[in-house]
Image (cartoon, helix red, strand yellow):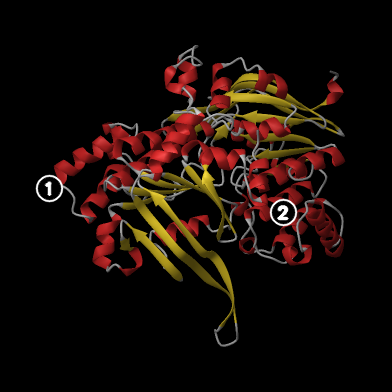
Amino acid sequence: MSKTDKILDIDNLSVHFKGEQGHTIAVDGISFFLRKGETLGIVGESGSGKSVTALSILQLLTKSAHYPTGTIQFHSEQGPVEILSLEEKELLKIRGNQISMIFQNPMNSLNPSHRCGHQVREAILLHQDVDKAEAKNQVLDLFKKVELPDIERIYNAYPHQLSGGQIQRIMIAMALSCHPKIVIADEPTTALDVTVQKSIIKLLSDIREEYGTATIFISHDLGVIKEIADRVIVMYKGKIVEQGSSEQIFSQPKHAYTKGLIACRPPLDKRMHRLPTIEDFMGTDDIVNNPKFRTISKSDFEARIKKLDQNETLLEVKNLSKHYPKTKGLFGNVKEWTYAVNDVSFTMKKGETLGLVGESGSGKSTLGKTILNLIPATNGEVIYKGQNVFNLSKREMKSLRKNYQIIFQNPYASLNPRMKIGTAIMEPMIVHDLHENKNIRKQKTIDLLETVGLSADHYERYPHQFSGGQRQRICIARTLSLNPEFIICDECVSALDVSVQAQILNLLSELKTQFDLSYIFISHDLSVVKHISDNIMVMQHGKIVERNNAEALFSNPQEVYTQNLLNAIPR
């Protein structure tokens, strides 16, 4: 490889953050390069240094960051440029113009008070010598390029009026607006449905083919990386532990951490009692023959389904609907409705885990919240253990809440940042007057912390002192504090790394057996749903379009919509 093949060269880069307690080493002496026109994948868990590395390339880190060692050399058309030596004025000429970035959360990446098209237009006006009319034409051409529908409407729309997938396409259009030499995509598909994710991956691949753009694609999802990357770098605790071609990394991983990342993703071709975790691989060489990772045979699974069918009915949903006003007339009369949940009926058995899948906007979360009576239904009935939930008084509903719980998607938004976690877990016990006194409640709280894999020492800590996976464990402990029988898990592992996700899925399976729980497990991640569910329902446009046991639905989907969802899963 000649030197001219390189467009980016990072050598011995270290990034430290200064703080009151000393300094934190986020990146520790890493070296790698990026060739012209290639896609380089960077994988690793949260905290591995992936995003810090990416943000360092554009010097977007906070002032507390400093670089004790290393260089970042960008090979521009004018010659090599040392990024770490540039003044802010010089950096502005590179950011968005020669090196651009697509951030992880599309909803937080655009200014909510400005129209989407205007924000992309401003990026063009900043770097190109064109007037507003020409800039608008360029934006509309870009919107066509990224396959947005109704481009004039989207040009004038505000971010809240668009879906996550549409906003991510706008961010890609913005990143491409000045035809950069390098695009850094930091977890650009993590929050998206599998079908939208597949279309974004294809779009980035097509753009690379057309423009010859070099791409750094950051993700913790190795399935996505395998689809898009030519070469792969694996990062762990700020270091590069393995790198090589995509084929080499996935067919012959050498480092235990890489093997763990690949293995902890729920497989589609077999059903496991328990998912491996990173710790399992880092601790032993013989994980293949470990009995705790045995698979469940097809006959054993079918026997379980038959046994479940004989259990008592726990939940019966009859003709349930939830409608929202979409447009109103001059005098407030509703002219058009949005049918978030539309005449849904199903039953589930005690001890069952019922998976609920579908794209964003299909009505999954609305159905879950309506079943729990957290939002009022428009029509229909929810019968829980023979009681119509919607006919209960406030006092009766409060009593039912002890058995009837939910774990929400975002562990960061689910806990009061000013409340110690011990108090947060104990609070439901106090509200429902469980246990005799504070000492007993405290001991129950400590027992719950230990049940979910935390310790008594964590009782006095605040939420900000925990990782995302630990916070989700705390939320699970709080849910269990009322000894529930039925829990709706609403995308409760979607925001987590695949390794942490495996830990939480294992925990939910163990708790189900230990406490005789029943779950409705809502997710857009079909491999996760297949792993944990007995039966699966597929939801589209507010309706259940298909239901079957997990193995049958994956092996022989009947509906075209289900087939499209399954075909979009990264393999």
Choose the circle earlier in sequence order: 2 or 1: 2
Q: Secondary structure at mark 1?
A: loop
The residue beneath circle 2 is 170
Q: Does 449 sit above or below residue 319?
A: above
- Residue lying farthest top? 285
Which part of the image, by quadrant, shows the N terminus?
A: top right
Q: Residue 504's quadrant in the figure?
A: top left
> Which amino acid, mark 2?
Ile
Along the line of sight, the residue nearer the viewer: 238 or 382: 382
| Residue 192, horizontal then vertical, whole percent | 61, 47
Q: Contact, CB < 8 Å: mark 2 with mark 1?
A: no
> Which amino acid, mark 1?
Glu
Q: Does 332 sit above or below residue 367?
A: below
Along the line of sight, the residue nearer the viewer: 402 or 519: 519
**Residue 568 visible in the shown view:** no
Q: Is residue 441 left or right of residue 11?
A: left
The residue beneath circle 1 is 436
Q: Residue at x 76, y 51 (%)?
A: 173
Q: Secondary structure at mark 2?
A: helix
Q: Is residue 179 left or right of residue 23?
A: right
- Residue lying farthest left? 436
